[in-house]
Amino acid sequence: MQDRRRLAFPAGVRSLAAALVEGAAELVAPTRCAGCDLPGVILCDRCRRSLPLIEPGEACPRCGAPGGLRWCGECWESDFAFSTVRCAGAFEPPLSRCITLYKDAGELRLAPLLAELAADATAGWLDGIDAVVPVPPSPAALARRGFDHTARLACDVARLTGLPAVEALVGRPRRDQRSLSRGQRLANAAGSLRVVRGASPPPRVLVVDDVFTTGATVDAAARALLAAGVAEVRALTVGRAVG
Ligand SMILES: [Zn+2]
Ligand SMILES: [Zn+2]
């Protein structure tokens, strides 16, 4: 203990070392605004103000599509297993850039912001929910990115909403969703998730994913959880594909 204390650097040297590390990181990958590339900030004030947020009271309560208070036309024809969805904003710039930079370029400093946007969208909507469950990426996507982007978001959402986070789902191998049509996505996502062996998720859960495109992935998550005895699954995503 005595030796460790003697070897410890004084506070001034430590902060200098931290500043040097930070400076070196800035040289390798300078901080740029995720929306407009303005140097020095992760998201500038102008881009933050122009985030295409969806007012929860002005979106389809079933699928989160902006622009309506009632179920949209598509929802009358779908049989989603989740009960309702909220999405923080439209998957358009600058929000789409933030999400893409976070998950595909590993800009982890955007995670707290994205989680905050998602948590803000849940105001007055979490009554009865017992836990937050991340929708895990496919094994291939996880290997490609090197980190679990939804687990990180879900844990931050759980902390912000005061709910426990339960990693109750695991992904099964499937084709990359990004190049698929709506019909192909639905077929590809079906059965792509399963409940962790031995897990017993609580009765009412909120699943968290990054983007709601066709709803196929959160639907697969909901089906797996309902089959494991969960009574209700709501879904929360940061982005919502529109148009
Ligand atoms: Zn900006
Ligand atoms: Zn809808």
Image (cartoon, grey):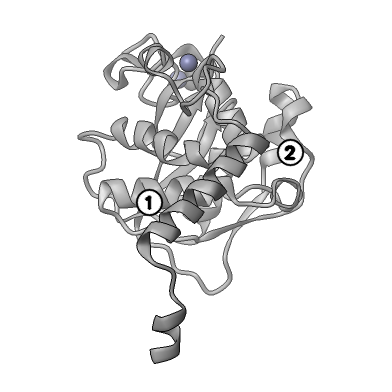
Residue on which the image places disc 2: 188
Secondary structure type for disc 2? helix
Report x, y in % for residue 37: 57, 18
Report x, y in % for residue 30: 60, 31
Residue at the (72%, 53%) spot, across then down = 139
On residue 189, which mark appears? none
- Residue 215 position (above or below residue 167): above
Residue on which the image places disc 1: 205
Residue 158 visible in the current orientation: yes
Neighbour tally class for label 2: few under 14, some 14-19, many 20 plus, Cα within 10 Å: some
Closer to the N terminus: mark 1 or mark 2? 2
Which amino acid is tagged 2? Asn
Which amino acid is tagged 1? Val
- Residue 142 position (above or below residue 123): below
Report x, y in % for residue 211: 54, 31
Where ligand 2 lies, by image quadrant? top left
Among the 4 quarters of the image, the one containing residue 185? top right
Residue at the (57%, 46%) spot, across then down = 149
Left-right relation of 224 to 87: right
Left-right relation of 176 to 166: right
Q: Nearer the viewer, residue 56 or 47?
A: 47
Residue at the (29%, 54%) spot, across then down = 163
Q: Nearer the viewer, residue 108 or 136?
A: 108
- Quadrant in which the N terminus appears: bottom left
Instruction: Measure how far apart labels 1 and 2 are at the Cα level.
Output: 23 Å
